[in-house]
Amino acid sequence: MLKHRRDMQRQIILPIVLATLLALAAGVLAGLAAAGYNPGVSMWADISIIWMIIPMMLMALIIVALLVATIQGLSQLIKKTPHYTAIAQGYVWWLNAEIQIWTNKLVQPVLTFKTWLDFFVKSEEEDEQQKRD
């Protein structure tokens, strides 16, 4: 378990954190390089950043809406689940009983035949033993 956790941190979390830090550093350096000491460039950089942030905010809004819908759906499902699972459990019990009934019906002739066969084999063995005695 400890090795799994260590491997997960090394192989998954660490690269994600490093990539995020690299992206943030590149963004800060790009902003500093573009702005410099010229206020006009800074204004256009701010406008560009706003236009880059708007699509991300819309995507975040869609993701939040999907998350809310998922939570609401799961809440409704959890409320209705006990009733339907009780019905499903009843069907499974019925199916189990039917399977046992039909299995017994299928096996019964085989067992009867085997019983008769053993009876006749033992009868023949007893007859042969009586003949020897």
Image (cartoon, grey):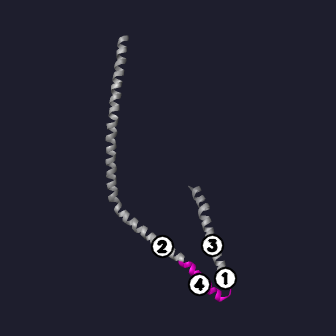
The residue pinned by badge 4 equals 47
The residue pinned by badge 2 equals 62
The numbered mark, 2 or 4, whose residue comes first in the sequence reads 4
Give the residue type at disc 1.
Ala
The residue pinned by badge 1 equals 34
The residue pinned by badge 3 equals 23
Task: Compute the Cα span from label 1 to label 2.
Answer: 31 Å
Report if residue 39 lies within the magenta region.
yes
Question: How far from the left and from the top, in percent, is residue 27?
Answer: 63, 77
Foreground tag (2 vs 3): 2
Which quarter of the rendered picture does the C terminus lie within?
Answer: top left
Give the residue type at disc 3.
Ala
Give the residue type at disc 2.
Ile
The numbered mark, 2 or 3, whose residue comes first in the sequence reads 3
Task: Compute the Cα span from label 1 to label 4.
Answer: 12 Å
Task: Compute the Cα span from label 2 to label 4.
Answer: 23 Å
Residue 72, above or below 128: below
Magenta region, residue range: 32-54
